Amino acid sequence: MSDSVAVQSVGEIVDSAREYARRQIAAFVRRLQTRQQGQPLSARVKLTASTRSSTRLPVLAQANLYIGEQPVRAQVAAAFVHEASQALRARLGEQIARLTNPDRPRPWPTGGVELEFGCTVPVGQRKIVRRKSYRLTWCTPDHAALTMDVMDYDCHLFVDACTGQDSLIYRVGPTGYRLSRLVPLPPPPAPVTPLTIDPRPVPQLTAEEAVARLDSTELPYRFFRDAATGRGTVLYRRYDGHYGLITTDGTSGGQ
């Protein structure tokens, strides 16, 4: 089973550490496959070692697992590969539990697993180093919250099926879930997920203006209406201290 778990590494990570990570995730996959009655599973692990001497948690571990057609993702940061591998296995267990019980929101704050990678880049030197364009899914806020949880995202951009608005769900506040739409509207009807609604209008910005606003805060992302397309867009902080930009490709898919 260990050979079916692919491990990629970036930076100085020794072979024995990669093999330890492989064994940890392979054991998790093997146990999960038994519960899934032999359903084929595939997994991919990426280990990244920071080259910055000031980084508090220099190892980032990420796992992508497919259960049939359902993707599951987990990401953790730690001081050492062994610690990160164990935390990654535990985190995957949390993701599967959330997927198995979609009506039970994941606790917030999560606690127990450190997710901060710790890389910083001074203001003025941060750049958009990755741009990702997606066909946004039409779904309910409940479904968007589930996707955010099982993919270990900080936020999730989607089209609210109740309103047709480009929307963002993210983790914050007393309930752990907040919904922001391009145009503020009443709460969705009877959501299962306990969420609060952001009443503020989403600003219309260029990508450069969004960078300037995020530079002036310690927030992990900025949701805005793209000045060129009028669509919902997210600028977010990457693990390397720079920025990534999530946009829509102009179409939206069904749930």
Image (cartoon, rainbow, N blue to C red):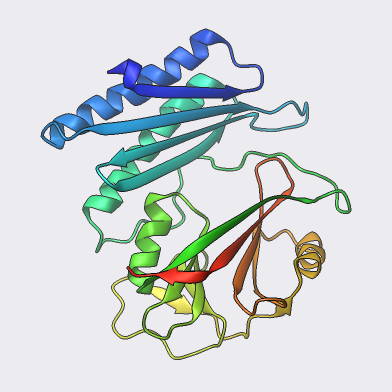
Q: Position of residue 250 (x, y in %)?
A: 55, 71
- Whether residue 171 is visible here, answered yes or no, is no
**Vertical relation: 141 (above or below) 50:** below
Relative to 17, is 181 above or below?
A: below
Image point 80% across, 60% down: which residue?
215
Residue in front for this viewpoint, 186 or 204: 204
Q: Where is residue 100 in the image (x, y as percent from the top left)?
A: 22, 51
Q: Nearer the viewer, residue 182 or 101?
A: 182
Residue found at x 66% / y 22%: 11
Residue with the most extreme top position: 16
**Left or right: residue 193 compared with residue 131:** left
Image quadrant assignment for residue 67? top left
Evaluate whether residue 165 shows in this view: yes
Name the residue: 45% across, 74% down.
159
Q: Where is residue 211 in the image (x, y as percent from the top left)?
A: 78, 62
Where does residue 65 sit, x and y in percent of width and height? 35, 38
Which quadrant: the N terminus?
Answer: top left
